[in-house]
């Protein structure tokens, strides 16, 4: 197990199932609900029910964050492109001007 994996396991141990699903699918895809549930069980301190994982992954699918095909899920490339665009927009805004912390209340 590498240090990056250990770091994420500690950070994810108390996270919601939806957040963990995204991190898991970033490393391994596609996964079924059963595969996601098994991996979440290894990651979280509190057990996650199969039904809870099912609801969480389907909510992500409904929000077009993950794609479902033949019972398997992966992160949506379109969602990743939108995330990248949002991130670049923030970087541009922050690069344009430095915040003057002295003017803040």
Image (cartoon, rainbow, N blue to C red):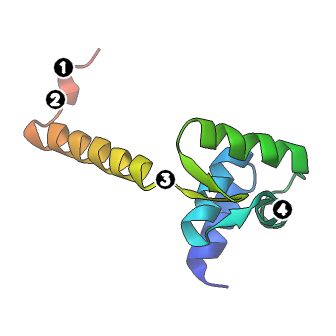
Answer yes or no: do the residues labelled 4 and 2 have beta carbons within 8 Å? no
Answer yes or no: do the residues labelled 2 and 1 have beta carbons within 8 Å? yes
Quarter of the image where one finds residue 51: top right
Instruction: Give the residue at mark 2.
Output: 100
- Dot 2 falls on a residue whose secondary structure is loop
Residue 54 x, y percent position in the rendering: 80, 46
**Quadrant location, the N terminus:** bottom right
Q: How many marks?
A: 4
Foreground residue, 1 or 65? 65
Instruction: Give the mark, 4 or 1, whose residue is nearer the N terminus.
Output: 4
Instruction: Give the mark, 2 or 3, whose residue is nearer the N terminus.
Output: 3
Residue 17 vs 4, above or below: the answer is above
Q: Which label sits on residue 103?
A: 1
Instruction: Give the mark, 3 or 1, whose residue is nearer the N terminus.
Output: 3
Foreground residue, 40 or 28? 28
> How far apart are the two marked residues, 3 and 1, measured between alpha carbons?
41 Å
- Dot 3 falls on a residue whose secondary structure is loop
Quarter of the image where one finds residue 62: top right
Answer yes or no: do the residues labelled 3 and 1 have beta carbons within 8 Å? no
> How far apart are the two marked residues, 4 and 1, measured between alpha carbons?
52 Å
Instruction: Give the residue at mark 3.
Output: 76
Answer yes or no: do the residues labelled 3 and 4 have beta carbons within 8 Å? no
Please give the name of the residue rendered at 17% of the width and 37% of the height, measured from the top-left corner.
93
Instruction: Give the residue at mark 4.
Output: 34
Left or right placement of residue 45 versus residue 1 in this view: right
Please give the name of the residue rendered at 73% of the width and 42% of the height, measured from the top-left corner.
56
């Amino acid at each position: 197990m590498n240090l990056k994996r250990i770091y994420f396991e500690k950070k994810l141990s108390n996270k919601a199932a939806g957040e963990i699903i995204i991190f898991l699918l970033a490393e391994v895809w596609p996964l079924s609900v059963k595969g996601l549930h098994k991996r979440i069980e290894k990651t979280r301190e509190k057990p996650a029910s199969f039904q809870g994982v099912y609801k969480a992954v389907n909510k992500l699918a409904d929000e077009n964050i993950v794609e479902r095909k033949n019972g398997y899920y992966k992160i949506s490339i379109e969602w990743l492109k939108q995330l990248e665009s949002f991130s670049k927009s923030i970087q541009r805004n922050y690069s344009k001007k430095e915040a003057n912390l002295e003017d803040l209340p």
